[in-house]
Image (cartoon, rainbow, N blue to C red):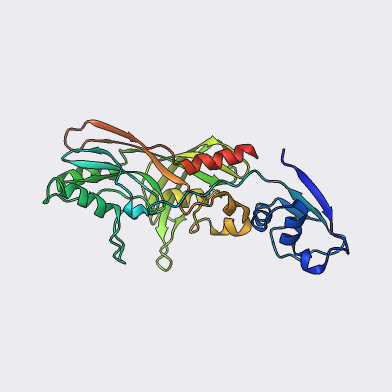
């Protein structure tokens, strides 16, 4: 169990040293950043109530309880930008190419016209073999999501693959880490999804208008602060997993768009996930080859940061 110590604020402590962060640093004999981490993680309470306000001014007679935390998960070392990483190809023939997309890289250009996208990387790659070849996007992953994507090399292959996705034939499995601990071990989320035209955010609607969306999930590893889940998509709407997990009350870690209110209420969750990406990974994809009809199955290992967080949670 984590060590817990309780301290009394006395008159001998001068007022400048009575800010919560300075008091915690002095009493626990830790550096300023470690004191902040404990406060933001909910490990400090004043008079029996958790306090996450680092600059809270303590009063004489206050009792401050400080809990030690496991070491913070190390931040990833600075790596080449996602746009400049070597393309990781899982499979390629004259009809399609399957790749493992890193987090932080756009799948296709946006209206702003970004040139560093996965589509551009694949186009440059296939042009080395045939300058007339053209990479065609069949489906997408959000910028801050990693995992498996397939691109077509011919218009005919793209049409056949898109028909598969439209009829929900491909088997798509994702791994995610969500905030909190769901009541159930598995479930299915069904809703109509629409887009707010002002904010361009997706949201669920009880009205029949919008796109029908179905997400199946099951628990992989449960902890009080966060859980790892496996998600299987029955439909593939934009932001579907992110919206549905937020609907469930357990947004994906790192999702500032759909989990913002949760992070504001529980700032300690932000400290759990220091990486600038979503805790969402497209781990497997199964589909039919667009020409031969042969079943193809691809897998991608869960990113190392997922395992680092699980180790941290297990140690608490």
Q: Is residue 313 left or right of residue 91?
A: right
Q: Give the camera-side residue of 53 and 24.
A: 24
Q: Is residue 257 left or right of residue 34?
A: left
Q: Give the camera-side residue of 50 and 230.
A: 50
Place of residue 212 in the rendered image (x, y in percent of width and height, measured from the top left): 38, 49
| Residue at 12% across, 47% down | 130
- Give above or below for 226 relative to 299: below
User: What is the quadrant of the N terminus in the image?
Assistant: top right
| Residue at 78% across, 54% down | 27
| Residue at 18% across, 47% down | 126
Q: Is residue 183 visible?
A: no
| Residue at 45% across, 46% down | 280
The image quarter in which residue 11 lies: bottom right
Q: Give the camera-side residue of 98 and 247.
A: 98
Place of residue 312 in the rendered image (x, y in percent of width and height, measured from the top left): 59, 41
Q: Is residue 89 left or right of residue 62?
A: left
- Give above or below for 97 relative to 60: above
Q: Is residue 236 visible?
A: yes
User: What is the quadrant of the C terminus in the image?
Assistant: top right
């Amino acid at each position: 169990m984590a060590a817990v110590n309780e301290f009394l604020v006395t008159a001998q402590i001068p007022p400048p040293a009575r800010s919560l962060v300075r008091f915690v640093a002095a009493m626990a004999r830790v550096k300023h950043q470690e004191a902040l981490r404990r406060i933001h993680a909910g490990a400090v309470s004043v008079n029996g109530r958790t306090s996450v306000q680092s600059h809270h001014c303590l009063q004489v007679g206050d009792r401050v309880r400080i809990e030690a935390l496991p070491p913070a998960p190390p931040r990833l070392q600075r790596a080449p930008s996602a746009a400049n990483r070597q393309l990781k190809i899982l499979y390629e023939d004259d009809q399609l190419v399957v790749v493992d997309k890193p987090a932080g890289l756009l799948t296709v250009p946006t209206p702003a016209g970004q040139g560093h996208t996965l589509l551009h990387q694949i186009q440059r790659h296939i042009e080395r073999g045939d300058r007339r070849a053209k990479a065609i996007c069949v489906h997408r992953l959000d910028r801050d999501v990693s995992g498996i994507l397939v691109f077509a090399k011919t218009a005919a292959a793209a049409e056949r693959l898109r028909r598969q996705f439209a009829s929900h034939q491909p088997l798509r499995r994702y791994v995610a880490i969500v905030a909190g601990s769901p009541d159930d071990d598995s479930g299915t989320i069904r809703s109509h999804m629409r887009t707010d035209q002002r904010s361009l955010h997706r949201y669920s609607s009880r009205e029949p208008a919008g796109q029908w969306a179905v997400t199946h999930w099951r628990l992989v590893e449960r902890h009080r602060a966060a859980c790892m889940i496996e998600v299987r998509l029955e439909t593939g709407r934009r932001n579907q997993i992110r919206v549905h997990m937020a609907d469930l009350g357990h947004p994906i870690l790192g999702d500032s768009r759909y989990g913002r209110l949760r992070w504001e209420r529980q700032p300690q969750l932000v400290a759990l996930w220091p990486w600038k990406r979503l805790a969402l990974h497209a781990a497997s994809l199964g589909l039919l080859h667009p020409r031969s009809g042969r079943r193809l199955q691809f897998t991608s290992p869960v990113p190392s940061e997922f395992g680092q967080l699980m180790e941290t949670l297990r140690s608490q």
